[in-house]
Image: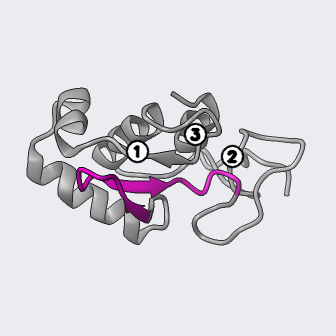
Amino acid sequence: MSVKATTWVWALELSPTEKLLALAYADYADPHGRDTHPSVGQLMERTRLGRRAVQISTRRLEEAGILIRVGATARGVAVWRMPIDEDPEGRTTCAGGGAPGAPQGAHDVRGRTTCAG
């Protein structure tokens, strides 16, 4: 588990299903919070989502740049990288303010700025 990856995921604006799945990937991330390779079965067990929901949401996380496929294990399980040191939308990340890893100028659910811009 990586606290850094988990913190990064919490700062992202995602649907509830995608947030849950991204948090599960973060739980399986290496200590640096980057590489993660849980199986679909492990993700299903951790999140209580069905196989198809895991597959669709994983594809959406990949399309959003939250998961980057970097290979596969010997058993064929995808290995993913979580770009926790950069914002998936290419924006500068917070430096010295706001939630760690939150995009600069990000807003919370009430529209307040969460990062010094």
- Is 25 positioned to the left or the right of 66 in the image? left
For marks 3 and 2, give the one nearer the viewer: 3
Q: Classify residue 68 as left or right of residue 32.
A: left
- Amino acid type at mark 3: Ala
Tell me which corner region of the image, top left, top right, bottom left or bottom right, holds residue 47. top left
User: Can residue 109 be seen in this snapshot?
Assistant: no
Q: Is residue 82 magenta?
A: yes
Answer with mark 1 or mark 3, whichever residue precedes in sequence: 3
Q: Bounds of the magenta span? A: 70-85
Q: Going from the N terminus, do you reach mark 1 or mark 2 first?
A: 1
Q: Nearer the viewer, residue 41 or 63?
A: 41
Mark 2 or mark 3, which is nearer the start of the sequence? 3
Q: How far across and how far down the image is residue 112, in percent?
A: 69, 46
Identify which residue is drawn at 40% across, 44% down: 22
Q: Which residue is tagged 1?
A: 22
Residue 54's place in the image compared with 67, above or below, is above
